[in-house]
Image (spheres, helix red, strand yellow):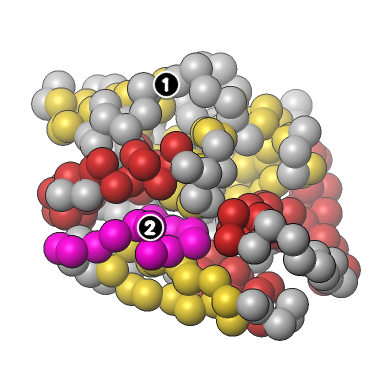
Amino acid sequence: MELKLYHFMPDKLNLYGDIGNVIALKKRCEWRGINLKIENITSTDGVKLSNCDMFFIGGGSDREQCIATEQFSKIKNEFKSAIEAGVPALTICGGYQFLGEYYKTVDGVKLPGLNILNFYTESKKDAPRLIGNILVESEMFGNIVGFENHGGRTYHNYNTLGNVIVGFGNNDYNKKEGLLYNNLIGTYLHGPILPKNPNVADYLIKAALDNKYGDYEWKPLENNIEFIANNHMVELLKKNIK
């Protein structure tokens, strides 16, 4: 079996080692005998998302995010169609934010997003950045651990990855993290997220296989090491709960 992943703007959107998510997907496919072909997309000219089985967008600074948004706006309709069709995707921080309507800077300037989904992000003047290790309890994925570092606060009414037990998540108000829509995952978790949370990685891989092949044998993996790391972080973070 073979899958193709589009990795968008790896030269600009690779904050805090986000490329580790692509490496994790590659290895977990390889261990199952699946050939994951990775195509690095640095220009969206002529790009057709119908040619890929999943895509990944990492995080970047505000400047890099603006440059990337210009590129992504050329294929906005392609993105929307792919998301609505259930193409699995992982979008991190800035890659998550610009799928919404806008990002409002601390100076009050509204940077337009792709407006694919109905949400927005704002940075508040004199408000602290939301930084630190994070623990999320998820009905779908179990305990999710990671690291967040963002000034923007995101607000939406979509399903989320889960409830924030330690940390902040989308904002410093409702204790929810990320966004889950069809097979699109948006999240503020760097670190990267997938090596420490194999259930999230396998969700993306399985969704891609479901879309492409329908009938196939799903091969479970031994995740002892991954879950030891995950459980260790969960125990450490829960000790800090007051």
Density class for disc 1 (Cα within 10 Å; few <14, some 14-19, many ≥20) is some
Q: Considering depth in this image, is 216 or 54 the residue closer to the camera?
A: 216
The image quarter containing residue 96 is top left
Amino acid type shown at disc 1: Tyr
Give me the C-alpha separation between circle 2 and circle 1: 29 Å
From the viewer's perspective, tell me whether residue 233 is left or right of residue 125: right
**Which residue does the image show at 82% across and 61% down from the upper left?**
227
Task: Say how many tags the image has.
Answer: 2
Quarter of the figure that contains the C terminus: top right
| Residue 41 is one of the magenta-drawn residues | no
Can residue 208 be seen by looking at this rendering?
A: yes
**On the image, numbered disc 2 is attached to which residue?**
50
Secondary structure at badge 1 equals: strand
Between 188 and 125, the residue placed more toward the observer is: 188
**Position above or below: 35 against 209:** below
Question: Magenta stretch?
Answer: 45-58
- The first of marks 2 and 1 along the sequence is 2
- Residue 194 coordinates in the image, percent (x, y): 62, 60
Label 1 sits on residue: 155
